[in-house]
Image: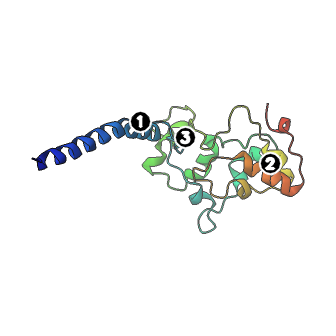
């Protein structure tokens, strides 16, 4: 005599063991994906800042070198001194609470003045073994927008983009030019 429940129980058991075997790899895969995948670099800055509000043609329309004046002549683009930012922000949004850290750093007349410089965090850091000379590229006619089409975007620099540009422009691509 055939027991119909036995066949059904066997199917259930097989399904249970299949799920039991599949669960650990799925959990490990999920842990790897969420734990080790590359995440965008979103540093916390001392003052909320967007390039768009400073460079947009309908707003301040400031050229990049107004703040990053090292880009024209030195290897690093540089960051503006707090006092440089304050030259405008004494008159533009002077009471905005978001700019309190700037006033604390550079405005000797501000109630919370400390004189401690703002500590900006690089948004697009290069690996330590890579050397990039902004001045050399600016003097060669490379515009900021060619490498930084959207400065506020969290787009990492890729070696392939540099190599493509160098090849298109007929510039040498020997490794020692950029890598230490």
Residue 34 vs residue 11, the one in the foreground? 11
Query: Is residue 1 placed above or below 31 in the rendered structure?
Result: below
| Residue 112 on image: x %, y % | 45, 36
Could you tell me which residue is drawn at 46 percent across and 37 percent down?
Answer: 32
Could you tell me which residue is drawn at 68 percent across and 39 percent down?
Answer: 126
Residue 3 vs residue 171, the one in the foreground? 3
Where on the picture, by quarter, is residue 105? top right
Disc 1 from disc 2: Cα separation: 49 Å
Q: Earlier in the sequence, mark 1 or mark 3?
A: 1
Residue under circle 1?
Answer: 28
Which type of secondary structure does the marked residue at label 2 adopt? helix
Q: Residue furthest bottom?
A: 58
Which type of secondary structure does the marked residue at label 1 adopt? helix
| Residue 74 on image: x %, y % | 80, 41
Residue 23 horizontal side relative to residue 90, left or right:
left
Could you tell me which residue is drawn at 81 percent across and 45 percent down?
Answer: 135
- Mark 3, Cα crowd under 10 Å, few <14 / some 14-19 / many 20+, is many
Q: Earlier in the sequence, mark 1 or mark 2?
A: 1
Query: Is residue 119 placed above or below 135 in the rendered structure?
Result: above
| Residue 38 on image: x %, y % | 54, 42
* Residue contact at pointers 1 and 3, CB within 8 angstroms: no
Residue under circle 2?
Answer: 72
Residue 92 vs residue 9, the one in the foreground? 9
- Mark 1, Cα crowd under 10 Å, few <14 / some 14-19 / many 20+, is few
Where on the picture, by quarter, is residue 82? top right
Residue under circle 3?
Answer: 107
């Amino acid at each position: 005599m055939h027991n119909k429940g036995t066949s059904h129980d066997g199917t259930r058991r097989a399904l249970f063991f299949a799920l039991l075997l599949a669960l650990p790899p799925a959990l490990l895969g999920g842990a790897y994906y969420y734990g080790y995948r590359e995440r965008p670099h979103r540093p916390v800055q001392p003052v909320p800042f967007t390039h768009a509000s400073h460079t947009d043609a309908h707003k301040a329309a400031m050229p990049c070198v107004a703040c990053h004046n090292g880009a024209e002549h030195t290897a690093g683009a540089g960051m503006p001194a707090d006092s440089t930012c304050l030259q405008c922000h004494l008159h533009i949004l002077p009471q905005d609470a978001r700019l309190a850290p700037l006033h604390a750093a550079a405005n000797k007349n501000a109630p919370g003045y400390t004189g401690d410089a703002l500590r900006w965090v690089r948004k697009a850091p290069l690996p330590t073994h890579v050397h990039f000379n902004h001045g050399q590229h600016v003097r060669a006619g490379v515009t900021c927008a060619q490498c930084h089409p959207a400065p506020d975007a969290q787009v990492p620099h890729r070696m392939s983009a540099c190599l493509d540009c160098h090849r298109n422009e007929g510039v040498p691509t020997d490794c020692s030019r950029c890598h230490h």
